[in-house]
Image (spheres, helix red, strand yellow):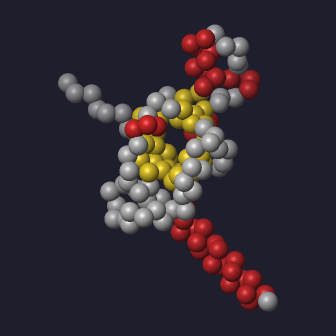
Amino acid sequence: MKRKFALTLALASALALISALPVFPGEDQDHTCPHACKPGKFEMMHATGVNYCVNCALKNELNAEVDCVKSGHQTALKITKYISFCGEEKPEFNGKTYFYFVSEAAKPLRTAHLGETVTVSGRLYFDLPVIEVQEFKVQKPEEKKN
C-alpha cells in the first residue's frame, strides 16, 4: 500500500513538474492542446503588456481616493499581445486588463516593474480577470536611434 502511494505521488509530482514547464511560441509543439486547458474556463498562454497599478491609474485619471503607500499597489497586466501556448494569436484580448493571482511567481510583478512591458506565461482564467503566473520576462526598452 505504501509503495503504491509513493509511486502515485512520484508520478503526480513528475506530471506537475512537466506541466509547469513553459512552452514558448515558435518551439516545436503539437497543435492539439497538451496543457490541460479547459475550454470556457482557462487557457495556458503568453501575454505581453504593461504592468501597472490599477489604483494609481484610477487616482490619476478619476481622482479616486486610494493610497498605495498605505495599502499597497493593486497591479495588473494591460494586454497588448496574447498568444495561447498552442501558438494561436488572439487579438480579442488586446486592451483588456487581468489581475495577477497571488503567488510567489507573481510577487515581483506586484511589488516592482510598474510601468514596464512584461511577457507573462501561465494560466488565464476567462470568468475572472485573473492570470496565474508561472513565469515572466521584463522586456528591454528598444534602443533609441540617433
Which residue: 57% across, 68% down? 17
Quick one: quadrant of the N terminus?
bottom right
Which residue: 20% across, 24% down? 146
Q: Is residue 51 left or right of residue 128?
A: left
Q: Is residue 65 left or right of residue 138?
A: right
Tell me, yes or no, if residue 138 can be seen here.
Answer: no
Judge whether 109 appears above or below 63 on screen.
below
Judge whether 119 appears above or below 70 on screen.
below
Which residue: 46% across, 62% down? 33
Give the mark count. 0
Report x, y in % for residue 112: 57, 35
Which residue: 54% across, 32% down? 97
Report x, y in % for residue 24: 40, 56
Q: Which of the 4 quarters of the picture holds residue 62? A: top right
Q: Which of the 4 quarters of the picture holds residue 139? A: top left
Residue, far top? 63
Q: Which of the 4 quarters of the picture holds residue 71? A: top right
Report x, y in % for residue 57: 57, 20
Judge whether 101 appears above or below 26 on screen.
above
Residue, far right? 1
Residue sitting nearer the eye, 15 or 108: 15
Residue sitting nearer the eye, 141 or 35: 35
Report x, y in % for residue 51: 52, 33
Judge whether 34 appears above or below 144 on screen.
below
Tell me, yes or no, if residue 56 can be seen here.
Answer: yes
